[in-house]
Image: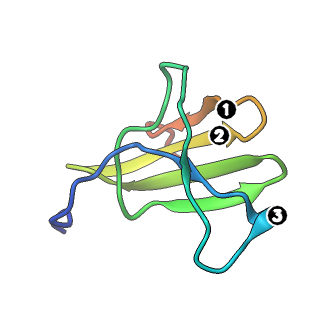
Amino acid sequence: MRSPSININSDLFRIDCSNIQKDKNEFDSIKIETHLSPSPRWGHIGVAYNNSLIIFGGRNENDLGDAFMFSTTSLEWTQLMDGTDKK
């Protein structure tokens, strides 16, 4: 499977859903201060859980089997799996 012909990056954005207004919404870039973060990827799975976002797998040049959790309160990533876990 080939990667899409678009620029893939690790940028993360948020929008304030408590104040949605037609044609007046803006996305804010989230600046991550930690050095641990997922590599740029596409085709991954993401879910929201409590105050966290969890992503699993996807692709860059290779298939990825890692998992990361992003805390929406502390704005920090935690690696849950490094992709070498085999079960």
Q: Is residue 70 left or right of residue 58?
A: right
| Residue designated by label 3 | 18
At label 1, the amino acid type is Leu
Q: Which residue is mark 2?
A: 70
Q: Return the disc, 2 or 3, that comes first in the chain's sequence.
A: 3
Quadrant the N terminus occupies: bottom left
Disc 1 and disc 2 in contact, CB within 8 angstroms:
yes
For marks 1 and 2, the one nearer the N-term is 2
Q: Residue 7: where, in percent of width, then height?
A: 22, 54
- Residue 5 horizontal/vertical position (percent): 15, 65
Q: Earlier in the sequence, mark 1 or mark 3?
A: 3
| Residue 25 drawn at (x, y percent) | 61, 66
Q: Tell me the residue at 20%/62% (across/down).
A: 6
Q: Residues within 10 Å of mark 1 (few under 14, many from 20)?
A: few
Report the front residue among 52 and 84: 52
In depth, the one of 19 and 52 nearer the eye is 19
Mark 1 highlights which residue? 75
Kind of residue indicated by mark 3: Ser
Q: Name the side, left or right, on which 25 lies relative to 12.
A: right
